[in-house]
Amino acid sequence: MIRFDILTLFPDMFQSPFASSVLKKAIDRGVIRVSVFNIRDFTTDKHHVVDDSPYGGGSGMVMKAGPIVEGIEWIKSTNGSPRVILMTPQGVTFNHGEAIRLSQYDHLLFVCGRYEGVDERVRKYIDEEISIGDYILTGGELAVMVVIDAVSRFVPGVLGSGTSVLEESFADTLLEYPQYTRPRVFRGKGVPEVLMSGNHRQITHWRRKEALKRTLVRRPDLLEKGNLPEGDLALLEEIKREERKENDS
C-alpha cells in the first residue's frame, strides 16, 4: 500500500480524478490511499492569507512559507514520515523511470505551488522537486494528478495484469507496438495477418519490430538512450533498409 498526501489551495480539484476509474478501485481496495489538505487550514490570521507580494518588487504574488511548512510538519507529526515533493517547473523532469522510483516509497507528500511560486525558505523542508514538462501550469494540482496516476500503476494490486505495465510504452525505452481488437475488419482495414496466426514466436517478433519502427519514427531520441541488444540493432537495420527501398520505389 502507498499513501499519497497533498497540500493544496484547491482541494476540490482532486475530487473527480480519484472518484472514478482505476484509481477509485485501488482506493476502495485499500491498495492506495489519498488524503488532501487545504494549505489555508494552516494559516494563523483570521483571513487565512496564504500569499504576499515579493520582496524586491515584481509582478504576481508568492506563496508564504508559514502555512506550507506548518502543513508539512503537521502531516509528519500525525501521519508518519513521508517523502516531501514540491511540484515546480524548476524540478527534475518526471518520466517512466521516476514513476518506478517513486512507487518504491510507502508515503509521498506533494506540495502544490501556485502564483509566482513558493517562498524560497520552504525548500529547506522539501526532499525533492519534480516537473512534468517544460511548460507552465496555473498550479501544481494537475501535475500531482499526473504523477499519482503514473506512480500508482506500479503499485501491486492497482492494475489487473502485471504484464501490461511491462509491455507498455517506455517500459524498455521503446514506444508500444500497435494494438488491435474486434472487429477483424473496420471500414475496409483489417488486422495484420500475423496477429491472427496463433504463432506466438512470429507475433512476438512482429510486435518488437513494430515497436522499434514506431520509436524510430516518433521518438528516435529514445533509441539513443536505450542500450539495445544485437537482435534489436539487426531489426533496426532491416527497418531502415525497407524504408529506403520504399522511398526508392
Image (tube, helix red, strand yellow):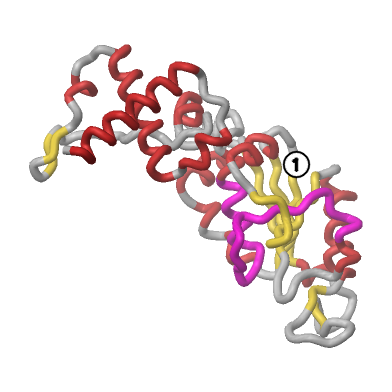
Which quarter of the rendering shows the N terminus?
top right
Left or right of residue 30: residue 21: left
Q: Residue at the far front: name it.
A: 248
What x and y, as percent, mark residue 129?
Answer: 76, 53
Highlighted range, magenta: 123-149
Q: Is residue 225 depicted above or below 18 in this figure?
A: above
What x and y, as percent, mark residue 53?
Answer: 82, 85
Is residue 168 visible to the viewer in this orientation of the structure? yes
Viewer-closest of 55 and 15: 55
Residue 113 is a magenta residue:
no
Disc 1: which residue: 107
Viewer-closest of 64 and 106: 64
Instruction: Give amino acid for label 1.
Output: His
Q: Secondary structure at mark 1?
A: strand
Q: Quadrant of residue 131?
A: bottom right
What x and y, as percent, mark residue 216?
Answer: 41, 38
